[in-house]
């Protein structure tokens, strides 16, 4: 066990190795390590954010779906109501039209009847005058009895 | 016969524990030591070529691997080498985050260098004790001790480096005056006790690197000796003890690297603290 210059040599070698390590070995690896740590942390962050976003989007989609379903049922209900209403209206219209037609027909019939009655009356008075002429044979003045006969016809 | 065996066993152990020393021998001048006595006679002006070579090799391997991974580092999905390197870096970052309380962005690389370098040097121990000595014998080199951390020079050298950093950061953070005050006025804040404090604190300061270096050296050296002793067994019995001991040493190798690194970080953290 001799203590000799090896001791000094070893110290010098140690100093050179430490210098080299400080200068060229440690920084790139350490930097890469820390950068990767940061990258991984960022990645994890992004992942959790994405999960949250996904949850929100799902919630929103569900809500939209629920709303649209509600709307659709509402629209359907409205349409049903509307169609019922339309049917009801059509029925009402048809009924009114029918009634109007019937009333028209009745009025026409009435008119027809009246006209026939008038005609009949005119003819009756004429017939009566003709009959009386026949009976009385020219002794009767048509003008003198005209009013009387008209009165008679109006009574018919 | 028994004595012969004993002599050869002692020679074998000593041979395996001798570093390849190059230095200034009083008689032979600058030369490789051919015996351990010659290595001792060289005194301080000698250098362990095997320790230096293997430790620098391991340090270069560590830096090359990590530099390669660093150049290719992406923020995408890592694979292969980058994965392993990032695991080590993260481990060291956690270690410094939990034990270092100052503000110094260099503490990470310092801890990483210490940990990986010591780990790689210690790992050389798993290689069977005879492989490299025999190989280098064939190449004409008498000694070859490949585990640098079983050389007290290497461990104390690193600890000395840590010690210099402790001094540097103490003065940088607290200023020379602040550091001097800390040495002279703690733990007893009274002018009359300055000499006592000074002795106490200086011992405390110097004990740090020495304990660091000797702990690593002691553990590794003891393990190495046991490996060498196991290698003395008959060849068919070696694996019986060698395998469990090697498996146990996977733990010791990484644990000692970890302890050295952690304690260095703790000491440096203390150097950054104001009292």
Image (cartoon, coloured by chain):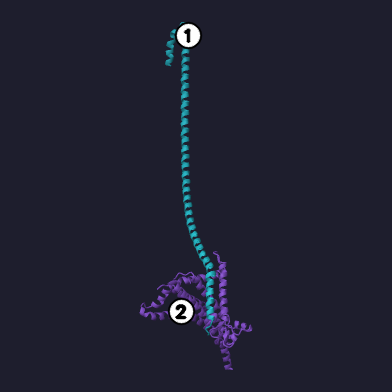
Chain colours: A cyan, B purple
Which chain is disc 2 placed on? B
Left or right: where does residue B26 sit relative to residue A155? right
**Relative to A1, does residue A69 appear above or below in the rendering?**
above
Q: Are marks 2 and 1 in contact (CB under 8 Å)?
A: no
Which residue appears at 46% of the width and 35% of the height?
Answer: A89
Q: Which residue is mark 1?
A: A133
Q: Secondary structure at mark 2?
A: helix
> Which quadrant would residue B239 be assigned to in this image?
bottom right
Q: Is residue B167 visible?
A: yes
Residue at left 45%, top 80%? B206
Mark 2 crowdedness (10 Å alpha carbons): few <14, some 14-19, many ≥20:
some
Q: Is residue A30 above or below residue B149?
A: above
The disc label shown at residue A31, or none: none
Mark 1 surroundings: few (<14), some (14-19) or many (≥20) residues within 10 A: some
Residue under label 2, please give it. Answer: B208
Residue B135 x, y percent position in the rendering: 62, 82
Tag 2 and tag 1 share a subunit: no
Residue lying at 54% horizontally and 74% vertically, measured from the top left? A16
**Spatial distance from mark 2 to mark 1, Cα to Cα?**
175 Å
Element class at badge 1: helix
Q: Quadrant of residue B189?
A: bottom left
Q: Nearer the viewer, residue B157 or A48?
A: B157
Q: Position of residue B144 (x, y in %)?
A: 59, 83
- Is residue B248 visible to us here? no
Q: Nearer the viewer, residue A36 or A123?
A: A36
Q: Chain of mark 1?
A: A
């Amino acid at each position: 066990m001799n203590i000799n210059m090896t001791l000094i040599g070893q110290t010098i070698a140690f100093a050179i190795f430490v210098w080299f390590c400080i200068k060229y070995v440690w920084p790139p690896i350490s930097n890469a390590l820390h950068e990767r740590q940061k990258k991984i942390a960022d990645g994890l962050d992004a992942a959790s954010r994405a999960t949250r976003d996904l949850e929100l989007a799902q919630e929103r989609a569900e809500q939209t779906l629920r709303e649209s379903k509600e709307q659709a049922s509402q629209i359907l209900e409205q349409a049903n109501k509307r169609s019922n209403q339309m049917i009801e209206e059509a029925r009402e219209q048809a009924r009114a039209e029918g009634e109007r037609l019937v009333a028209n027909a009745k009025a026409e019939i009435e008119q027809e009847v009246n006209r026939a009655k008038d005609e009949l009356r005119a003819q009756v008075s004429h017939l009566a005058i003709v009959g009386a002429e026949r009976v009385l044979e020219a002794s009767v003045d048509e003008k003198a009895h005209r009013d009387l006969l008209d009165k008679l016809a109006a009574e018919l | 016969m028994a004595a012969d065996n004993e002599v050869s066993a002692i020679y074998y152990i000593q041979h395996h524990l001798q570093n390849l020393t190059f230095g200034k021998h009083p008689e032979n001048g600058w030369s490789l030591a051919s015996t351990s006595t010659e290595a001792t006679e060289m005194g301080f002006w000698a250098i362990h070529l095997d320790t230096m070579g293997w430790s620098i090799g391991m340090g270069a391997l560590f830096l090359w691997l990590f530099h390669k991974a660093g150049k290719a580092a992406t923020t995408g999905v890592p694979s292969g080498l980058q994965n392993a390197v990032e695991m080590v870096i993260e481990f060291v970052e956690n270690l410094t985050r939990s034990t270092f309380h100052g503000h110094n962005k260099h503490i990470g690389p310092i801890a990483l260098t210490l940990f990986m370098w010591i780990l790689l040097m210690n790992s050389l121990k798993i290689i069977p004790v005879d492989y490299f000595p025999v190989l280098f014998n064939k190449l004409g080199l008498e000694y070859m001790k490949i585990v640098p951390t079983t050389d007290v020079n290497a461990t104390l050298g690193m600890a000395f480096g840590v010690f210099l950093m402790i001094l540097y950061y103490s003065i940088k953070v607290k200023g020379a005056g602040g550091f001097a005050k800390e040495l002279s006025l703690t733990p007893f804040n009274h002018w009359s006790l300055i000499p006592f404090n000074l002795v106490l604190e200086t011992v405390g300061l110097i004990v740090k690197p020495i304990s660091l270096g000797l702990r690593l050296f002691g553990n590794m050296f003891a393990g190495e000796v046991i490996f060498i002793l196991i290698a003395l067994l008959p060849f068919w019995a070696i694996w019986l003890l060698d395998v469990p001991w090697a498996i146990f040493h996977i733990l010791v190798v990484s644990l000692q690297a970890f302890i050295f690194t952690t304690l260095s970080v703790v000491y440096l953290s203390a150097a950054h603290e104001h009292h």
